[in-house]
Image (spheres, grey):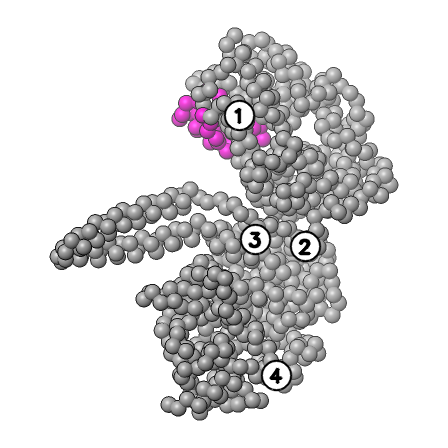
Amino acid sequence: MSDFAGMEELLQDFLLESTELLSDVDNKLVELEKRPNDRALLNDIFRGFHTIKGGAGFLNVAPMVTICHRTENLFDKLRNSELGLSSELMDVILDATGAVRDMFTVLSQGLPPPNPDPAMLAALDAALAGNLAAVKAPAAAPAAPVVQVQAPAPTPAANSNEPNWEALHQAVTGTEQHVAAVNAPAAAPVDMAAAATMVVESAPAELIPAAHVPAAVVPAAPKPQNKPAPSTGGPISGQENTIRIDTVRLDQVLNLSGEIGLTKNRLTTLRTEILQGNMETNTLRSLDEAISQLDLLVSDLQNAVMKTRMQPIGRLFQKYPRLARDLARQLGKEVELVITGEETELDKTMIEDLNDPLVHLVRNAVDHGVESAEERIAMGKKPQSLIELTAEQVGDHIVIEITDDGKGMNPEVLRRKAIAKGLIDAETANALDEKQCLQLIFLPGFSTKDQISSVSGRGVGMDVVRTNIQKLNGRIDINSIQGEGTRISISLPLTLAILPVLVVRACNQPFAVPLAMVREIIPIDTTAIQEVSGRPTIVVRDEILPLKTLSGLLNWQPTQKPNFGVLMQSAEKSFILAVDSFVGRDDVVIKPLQNIRPKGVAGATLSGDGSVVLVLDMEDLLAGQMDSSANGSIMLRNADNFSY
Amino acid sequence: MADKNLRFLVVDDFSTMRRIVRNLLKELGFTNVDEAEDGQVALHKLKTQHFDFIVSDWNMPNMTGIELLRAVRADAQLKHLPFLMITAEAKRENIIEAATAGASGYIVKPFTAATLEEKMNKIFQNLNK
């Protein structure tokens, strides 16, 4: 049991289960701050650490056992009212939780975790002994015995792993096996002292009396090479490659594949009949039925398989109350994070990719969104601010909203800021309405905080958030009312496996464009094309939009003059994509192209008639458009040579 | 040596731990193992199915190991079943409590297959006395 060899699977299970357990503990800790005397909570947290310790023991992860053991003991004292909870104690506990989480990360990389930070262990020990500088003096008496037993008094039962069960059993129950009503209490008090020593005994030998700790330990503390990269910050879940699936869902997949097998058999029989020349109406009707059934079954199977990948978003959300709490504490704000809709389900890969953007949004809400208690009181608001994080399924989309009751955003301030930072020119800025001004925060390099804090405000935030959301084929929107708060809504498709597209034609070939980016379709009237600083544009409802031909973007030779424009809402701005004609809307499964990667092509898919349709990656396609009057427009002028 | 077809019920709220115990039992040749995630589920299984041996964790939600033990010993149908209690603590009062409630044995986490075997053999010996 000295190595992880042969235990990888077990380790994976342990990490998966314990990480969930620890997140749960984290949330309960945040709850506990509100209701410090809640016995049920204290018990649950105690059991959480106890369980993790048990598993870690089997996996021989001694450092984790060390931390969990102390934390567990701390909660044992808390639930027995031998200690009182203070915010200092809470910080010690949260540190310990963080350390355990870091160890999970190290373990998930197959490495043995480093020894726990001695300073943290010392703090835990001090807390256990009731000596933590500002720990509220407990009922005084209970703390005393623990301190005194710290002198490792060797007791006869020193071998704590091997209690003499036989002797005990006989002593207590007599030699007979059946349950006897023995008067145990008589024996118990004698053993209490011994039991108290055991707590200390089973702790590792490096235990140092609390009083000596700070001086003795600090020099040993820095061991950077052993630590997991701290720069990544926050909880790192790592990419999990195992998934837990409700057996009901798995059975459904099994059932459906069985049904499909039966239908296939039916089709085979029918094929034989037809090949033998049996073309009777009945046979053809059966064929029709079998194919309709197959149709239904396949789409059911697709759904069922998709469902196996669906996970409740609560797994992600449950990390945030702690995040908000820590940050609020650091900033001296009072914040409550209320979560609803954690049972909403989303594709597993999306859940993982959503973490970073959501962490950023939660941090932003706490840091920029809400005011300090003093400011709030001055404005006649409750001192405690409220941040709501909600998720719900709306049609075939998942909508995640994060709403704060803070100061809201001032469009004018944003406008001035964007100009001052040189992100947009004054002329463009003045043309923006209030709603568009709010969108400015998504520009790269935009940050409204004048002072860079360690928390946020490094200007790498919202543009990355938006890019990440768009990678998931999602949209992000802002609403803000000054003085009342801000709401950020994210809308995501249920899954990435199936992409709704608009199929268009250009250069005699079909192309698929992600439907999420399509705002509307307009006919292109050549007389409506205006040149603005050498670039063709069309004015649509007072909005000046650049016109780019698909053939131009692809650098292909146009075969005809484009008839239609697709109004695309892309990351940076809106534009009109000029295409020859339309095929229609479709739901496709993207197949990646092997070995070749043409610019602007995300992959390929098959249309109903069996022809290959290239699926376009608009971001990539536009990436080459850095120089403002790129090929698209030139090509359009070339296209002018085509006569109608 | 004990019959390898003995049917075990492993009770623990932590599925990793159930798997560990199951693996250890497998190492010892016992493959007929079922699991329960707490005392309540275990008791229900015990009442509706046949088992020969209970291995239970102590600290669990809903119904703890010691509560399960008491319930088992109070049930005329089940009270003869060998009951091995697993716990992370080697606290004296816990051991006494388990013994008083009628546990057949007591094992402290973490343990190896060899320790488990030793404990089980003692229990089998006592049974055959």
Whichever of labels 3 and 2 marks the residue nearer the N terminus, that label is 2
Image location of residue A511, percent across then percent down: 42, 72
| A198 to the left or right of A540 | right
Label 1: which secondary element: helix
Q: Residue at x 48, y 55 (%)?
A: A346
Q: In the drawing, what numbered circle is on residue A232?
A: 2
In front of the other: B103 or A406? B103
Tag 3's secondary structure? helix
Q: Is residue A479 shown left or right of residue A146?
A: left
- The spot of residue B111 in percent (x, y) is 61, 26
Q: CA distance from mark 3 to mark 4?
A: 38 Å
In depth, the one of A528 and A258 nearer the eye is: A258
Discs 3 and 2 share one subunit = yes
Comparing marks 1 and 3, which lies closer to the viewer?
1
| Crowding at mark 3 (Cα within 10 Å: few <14, some 14-19, many 20+) | many
- Mark 1 or mark 2: which is in front? 1
Marks 4 and 1 sit apart, C-alpha to C-alpha, by 74 Å
Asked if badge 4 and badge 1 are on a common chain, one would say no
Sort mark 4 into few (<14), some (14-19) or many (20+) by Cα contacts within 10 Å: few
Residue A336 in percent (x, y) is at 63, 55
Q: Earlier in the sequence, mark 2 or mark 4?
A: 2
Is residue A331 within the magenta segment? no
Residue bearing mark 3 = A317
